[in-house]
Amino acid sequence: MKSITALILSAALVAILGGCKAYKPLERIDWDERVKSAKIKVRISSLEDAEKLALIGNTTLNQMRCEAAGADEVIKETGWWEDPEIGLDLSRIVDPAANPFQGGVSATFTIPISQVYKLEKKAARAYAASERSKILSAENTIAAEARKIAAALFFIDEKKRVLKAFESDASIAKAIADSEKLFLAREYTLSDLNSVKRRKHERDHALMELDDERISTEREFRAIAGLLSCTEIEIAFTLKEPQTTSLKAPSPADLARHPAVKAALAELDLKESELETEIRKQYPDLKIGTDISIEKGNDKAGLFAGMSVPLWNRNRKAIAEARKDRAVKRAEALGVWKSITVEAKASEERLATLLAHPAAPASEETDAAGLLEAGEVTPLEYLEIREEILALTLENVRWRRAVTLAHEELAKYKVISD
């Protein structure tokens, strides 16, 4: 009997030590190295480049990917039976006796006849599917936003290029100089000369505002692409004239397959699995075990079995909470779908409104320069004509930007067939 007891204790010790995992500390973050590696220049060659940068570097997405990877690991480690329990007791008889010590050892196993472990594994799979669906939804949104920000940076640079080209135009500089000479010759009034200077001052302010806007827009791109403040951003692409064909938003029925709706439905499936698991936990599991006791002349071995009686059903609170969570997620899924249908329709209408913009009149820069050369218009009149053309050019850039962003916004609601 003693040898059996020793064997059981040895097996229990091996099982305890074999089932334990060793702790391994995570490598510490080298902040200096990360700062050094981030001192680079990012050259964005297309809207697709901007999209890829954001999908790779976005901190929120990478956190979600870590969560999804962890969820897959949880699936592997879910569904195990409860660990067996080993018991040992030792007592000494107080009254004098030839053998005053007696003891016993027991081992108890839980047989999950309720099959809860299978439902827990199903819930873990639902959780992993939910995390993957949320990643796809976030990727769809982040890709569209990155393209929009990159397009905005391009049009900021385009406006600056137009303004700087105006300022560096030789005919503009000559007209301003001639206006000053005519003022000195008393051909122009101080009001005429100051109107030229005021408009020049407005253009300088416009360039300053564009520089400020670029700083703000660069900050948005760094945030969405996970870049540090020391990273330079260069826009190295040109956007063509936007498409003038109006696009239609997907129908409400099609939008039920949108990534954001799928993510909401995946969360609903998760809550459904959790509710099913909680309901199954009402049912008891079977506990069986062995009992070996050692006492001089009365050594014995036996088996025992038992189970809990769910008379009070303490799990009813968890079931009620799971039902509540399921109802909330169902309402959220409907809310996400309704919100997307409204936003998609509004994006369609905005794009259609922008595309109804009338065509701009043709530029007459060459004709105006010829009239100035021929003396048909004064330097002041020439400046007014060129400034009107400049305003029209800048307005066209603003319109192109609005149309491009409207196209990218509507693309967020594109539904890819399963």
Image (cartoon, rainbow, N blue to C red):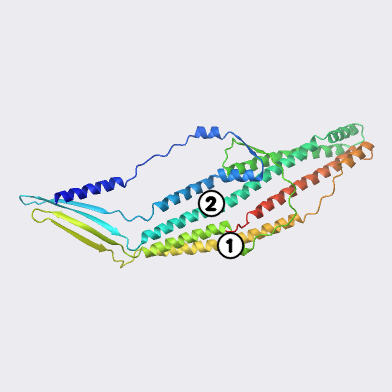
Q: Amino acid at mark 1?
A: Ala
Q: Whole-percent x and y of residue 117?
A: 37, 58
Q: Is residue 381 at least partly visible in the picture?
A: no
Asked which quadrant contains residue 229, the reply is top right
Residue at (28, 64) in percent of width and height: 308
Residue 357 vs residue 385, the one in the foreground = 357
> The residue under label 2 is which amino acid type?
Ile
> What residue is shown at x 91% (from left), y 38% (from top)?
372
The correct choice, above or below, for 255 with respect to 23 in the image is below
Residue bearing mark 2 = 135
Mark 1 lies on residue: 256
Q: At numbered mark 1, what does the secondary structure look like: helix, strand or loop?
A: loop
Q: CA distance from mark 2 to mark 1?
A: 17 Å
- Give the image location of residue 339, x and y in percent: 60, 60
Residue 83 makes an appearance in the image? yes
- Give the number of marks: 2
Decide which of tag 2 and tag 1 comes sooner along the chain.
2
Quarter of the image for residue 116 reads bottom left
Instruction: Please rate how many residues cluster around mark 1, counting C-alpha atoms within 10 Å: few if below 14, some from 14 to 19, many from 20.
Output: many
User: Left or right of 417: which side holds 303?
Assistant: left
